[in-house]
Image (tube, grey):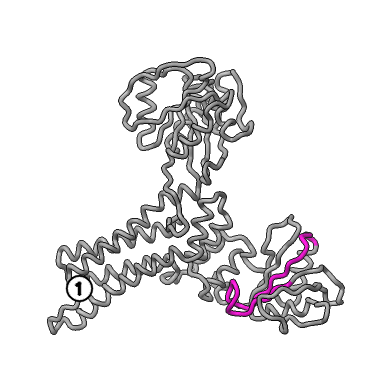
């Protein structure tokens, strides 16, 4: 990472996935336009330097012997008006793996270096085109698998989260400056910082930081998907239900008890949110060692799940209800009465710790599955996300917010105890430091930057 921070050599990489009809090669660095100009031939022999920035030029990429490699479109971006803040060129080629490799090898021979993962975005960060939270949003946007996670990443990329942090920073600086000004005149017994005003402002900051930190639970669920465990006795229709929810024959269905011996996982979207369904081994007493291991995993997945579907096909005993109630405390439980096409029954009266939702279905005939999907979505309790909402999805951000929250809480405690301004000032500086870590202003460790950007794909 230290080498990348100091390396300003012009870089190149394929910026699109392999196998498409077109492939875009990205070049960035002070010599980007010069290097591509040596390989590009326009119909009328125009140099790329004579073309207006951000315009597309048709032509050919040719090798050192002037043999054409491909028919291309080239777009030039002049610093600082580019993604990286450097001179940049994007070459749109045909998607042949051979052609793309030939163009990349030619660029390397002409003076480029193959870009490392995330190096284009790293340069954008280093050149002030985006802060660190926005840079991380690029990776999140690429990895987004549903509408909600893409919307959150796009909002963060546009600077919504950075804007919230900037507002907090301004307020913290205001408090800090008042207290430190007071310290400068401590020998003259001058008061610049009214303690009630400071307390109100610090409480406002604490509330906002706490709100951002609390949003991480929602953000993590949207980003990673909400886990839903399907549990119940053997042969109650769990695997059939999973297949209906996934709309494909994912799990083996059989009348033989104990068919599912391990967990089966797959993901679907409900109203733009990913749900990870886990079909588990049927719960029963068995001497089969393999099946017993599967049942152990059932209880493990039950612990990890946010939502639990308890599938039954007859009235459970009170002891079974008590056991399920104990295992699902703090989770959202949906009792799914299956095989309603065959029989109906009355669920025993029970005083639940948390009242579950009851849904009757016939997985075999696909009856009431949409109602069950709605119940699953409602059980996830995901708030409606609007375009400008800020929801924290990154563990690093959450940890920094947690530390900042502890710091501002110490400020409030110090005000209540009438501590001296120098002690308050230290905690305020700590709070500022942790918030700055999110956007990159407080990061000096190359190891931290390396850990962030190494997960990016090449070309970004």
Residue 455 visible in the current orientation: yes
User: Residue 332 occupies which quadrant of the picture?
Assistant: top left
Which structural element holds mark 1?
helix
| Residue 37 relative to residue 157: left or right | right
| Residue 96 relative to residue 238: left or right | right
Residue 451 visible in the current orientation: no
Front residue of 297/392: it is: 392
Could you say where residue 3 lies in the image, as x and y percent from the top left? 57, 73
User: Residue 441 occupies which quadrant of the picture?
Assistant: bottom left
| Residue 389 relative to residue 17: left or right | left
Could you say where residue 189 lies in the image, as x and y percent from the top left? 12, 81
| Residue 353 relative to residue 200: left or right | right
Q: Quadrant of the C terminus?
A: bottom right
Q: Residue at x 37, y 56 (%)?
A: 213
Could you say where residue 300 lies in the image, as x and y percent from the top left? 45, 34
Front residue of 128/54: it is: 54
Q: Quadrant of the N terminus?
A: bottom right
Q: Residue at x 72, y 79 (%)?
A: 35
Which residue is tagged 1? 421
Q: Residue at x 39, y 53 (%)?
A: 215
Q: Residue at x 45, y 50 (%)?
A: 220
What segment carries the magenta color? 74-98
């Amino acid at each position: 990472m230290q080498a990348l921070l100091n390396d300003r050599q012009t870089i190149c990489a394929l910026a699109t996935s392999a196998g498409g009809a077109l492939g875009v090669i990205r070049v960035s660095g002070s010599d980007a336009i010069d290097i591509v100009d040596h390989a590009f031939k326009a119909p009328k022999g125009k140099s790329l330097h004579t073309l207006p920035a951000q315009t597309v030029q048709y032509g050919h990429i040719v090798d050192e012997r002037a043999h054409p490699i491909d028919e291309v479109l080239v777009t030039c971006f002049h610093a600082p008006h580019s993604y990286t803040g450097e001179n940049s060129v994007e070459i749109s080629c045909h998607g042949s793996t051979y052609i793309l490799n030939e163009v990349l090898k030619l660029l390397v021979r002409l003076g480029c270096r193959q870009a490392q993962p995330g190096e284009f975005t790293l340069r954008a960060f280093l050149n002030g085109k985006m802060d660190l939270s926005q840079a991380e949003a690029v990776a999140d946007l690429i990895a987004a698998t549903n509408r909600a996670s893409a919307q959150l990443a796009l909002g963060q990329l546009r600077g919504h989260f950075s804007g919230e942090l900037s507002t907090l920073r301004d307020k913290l600086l205001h408090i800090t400056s008042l207290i430190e000004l007071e310290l400068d005149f401590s020998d003259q017994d001058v008061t610049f910082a009214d303690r009630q005003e400071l307390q109100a402002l610090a409480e406002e900051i604490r509330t906002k930081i706490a709100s951002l930190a609390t949003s991480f639970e929602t953000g993590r669920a949207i980003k990673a998907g909400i886990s839903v465990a399907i549990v119940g006795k053997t042969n109650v229709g769990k695997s059939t239900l999973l297949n209906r929810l996934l709309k494909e024959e994912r799990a083996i269905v059989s009348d033989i008890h104990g068919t599912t011996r391990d967990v089966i996982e797959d993901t679907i979207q409900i109203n733009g949110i990913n749900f990870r369904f886990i079909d588990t081994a049927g719960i029963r007493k068995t001497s089969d060692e393999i099946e017993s291991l599967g049942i152990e995993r059932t209880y493990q997945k039950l612990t990890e799940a946010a939502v639990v579907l308890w599938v039954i096909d007859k009235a459970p005993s009170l002891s079974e209800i008590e056991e399920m109630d104990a295992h699902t405390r703090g989770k959202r439980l949906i009792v799914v009465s299956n095989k309603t096409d065959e029989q109906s029954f009355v669920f025993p009266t029970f005083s639940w710790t948390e009242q579950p939702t009851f849904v009757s279905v016939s997985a075999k005939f696909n009856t009431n599955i949409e109602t069950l999907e709605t119940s699953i979505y409602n059980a996830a309790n995901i708030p409606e996300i609007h375009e400008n909402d800020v929801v924290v999805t990154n563990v690093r951000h959450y940890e920094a917010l947690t530390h900042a929250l502890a710091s501002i809480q110490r400020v409030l405690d110090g005000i209540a105890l009438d501590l001296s301004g120098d002690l308050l000032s230290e905690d305020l500086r700590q709070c500022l430091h942790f918030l700055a870590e999110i956007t990159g202003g407080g990061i000096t460790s190359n190891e931290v930057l390396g850990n962030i950007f190494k997960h990016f794909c090449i070309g970004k």
